[in-house]
Image (tube, rainbow, N blue to C red):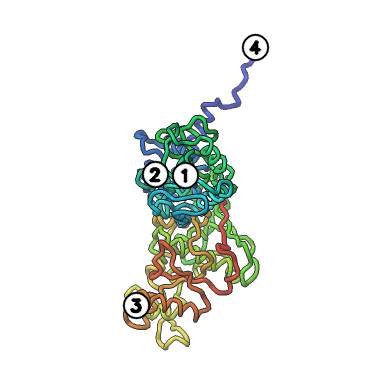
Amino acid sequence: MTAVPPVALQQSTEEVASTALARKVERNRQYAASLGWGAHLSAVRRALNPKRTGWDDAALVTEAAKWQARTGLAADGLIGPATWSLLRVAAGLGKDPAISAQLPDNGPGFYGTGPADRRYGRAETVRALQAVAAAWQQARPRGPRIGIGDIGLRGGGPITGHGSHRLGLDVDIRPLRDDGREAPVVQGHPGYSRALTQELVDRLRANGVLRVHFILFNDPGVRGVQRWDNHDNHLHVRFASPKAAPASQTAAPTAAVPVPQHAGGAAVRPAAAGTIALGTLTTLAPGPAGTAPPYRFSPEDLLWTARFIIGESGGRDDLETHAVLYAMFNRYALLTRRHYATFEAFLRAYSTPLQQVLKDWRAARRHMHRPDYVRTGDTYKAPAPPGIPRGQLRGFHRLQQSRWDQLPDAARSVAFRALTGAIPNPIGNATEFGSTWQYFRDAHRRSPNLAEWQQYTVTLAQRKGWSWIGPVPGIDQTKNAFFTDRRLAGLPRGAVRILPP
């Protein structure tokens, strides 16, 4: 009997690798559209590897994986929500409000070197450095103290003199000297102490606040460091990002599934909607209405959130838009969840541009004489003055009926990142916002000065039972001031969280 050759049932290693790469390439194409980074491809490439000249889709996967590995993320080569939230900052395409903790000029066990405006980092980074320095002072009360230099700029992003130091995770530290002086020194030169520098490295790695990802330094006799060019006179410490990439980042992104469309206010849910990976809204403590169960965002929530961003902020991707979104998350989770079964229903009821008919007669009175005001044939009842016709602007109706693929990339990107937990909370537990500058103008028929605006804002808050959150770096509150309901005063800051999918 002639032997029959066995049938090949398995792909070769090369075929498997090629198939996996092709899948990642396709997923990155989808992420480029859904998150919006495809419109900034040149900046993304420069952030990943400024020295590379030959780029294609496969190279993007390779360089993304290397960048993720250097940053402490899962190195899968996919620029999904978690990676993009950091990469966009590194590329200089946005600021991160979490990078706002400044290391002082000096403190227990340390002194700062260089300009103070280059010592901004994440709160965890600064706490880790202060913990190391405090333990150092306790062990060596006579010094020398630790010299800490550049960390990064407020909000992160590119900084002169460095290819890194963009995410609030990097810090330059002077090696220690053996003569007690607090001054620069080069490893191997007179005055350099290998023993004290080794002790510093050991304390950094055992800081207990934030894991150290790597330390670059060129003394081969020091354990726990890696050699790198131009690191003879300082230790470059990179802490691991506290933003771990979610395991589900490798799942098909939102853009791979049709987002439900709405016509005339009626929702159409696609059969595949359940495969869209969105986050879950949770609370750390009960609000005035009690503890709300976790809420998983839906495709309808995603679509209406993008529309909300366009209607309320013009579709911008900036800190003020992020703040408005978190006010909505906080209000829904802590105050109004029991009144609305879904987040999109809450948005459509709350946001003026998303209302089929304007709820506030004051808004209708402002718009009623415009040619694009669509009347419904009825008038608002008391306490509204008689004769104000109910209706809505035609442009807002168009917005409410816009398909996902008709919405600007920036609005889609913000909505997707927000609903997957990739945008930090810049306003704590604030649940209210409004243009108190405009309110003052309406009441006094003139613009206020800053002192008048602030007093008006504080007084309005007191009258409403709110507390103004005060100035927030990066947010111009003359456009929208943010307030916390006083019933939430006992909650921990940032009581509402969005867990990644």
Instruction: Please report contact status of discs 2 and 1: CB closer than 8 Å, yes or no.
Output: yes
Q: Which of marks 4 and 2 is nearer the N terminus?
A: 4
Q: Which of marks 4 and 3 is nearer the N terminus?
A: 4
Q: How far apart are marks 2 and 3 (CA)?
A: 42 Å
Whether residue 166 is situated above or below residue 309 in the rendered picture? above
Q: Where is mark 2, residue-wise?
A: 44
Q: Left or right of 123: which side holds 5?
A: right
Which of the pair 88/448 is nearer the observer?
448
Q: Which of marks 1 and 3 is nearer the N terminus?
A: 1
Q: How far apart are marks 4 and 2 (CA)?
A: 59 Å
Residue 2: assigned label:
4
Q: How far apart are marks 1 and 3 (CA)?
A: 45 Å
Mark 2 or 3: in front is 3
Would residue 293 be visible to someone looking at this image?
yes
How far across and how far down the image is residue 167, in percent?
A: 45, 48
Q: How far apart are marks 4 and 3 (CA)?
A: 97 Å
Q: How far apart are marks 1 and 4 (CA)?
A: 53 Å
Would residue 349 be visible to someone looking at this image?
no
The amino acid pointed to by label 1 is: Ile
Q: Where is mark 1, residue-wise?
A: 79
How many residues crowd mark 2 within 10 Å: few (<14), some (14–19), many (20+)?
many
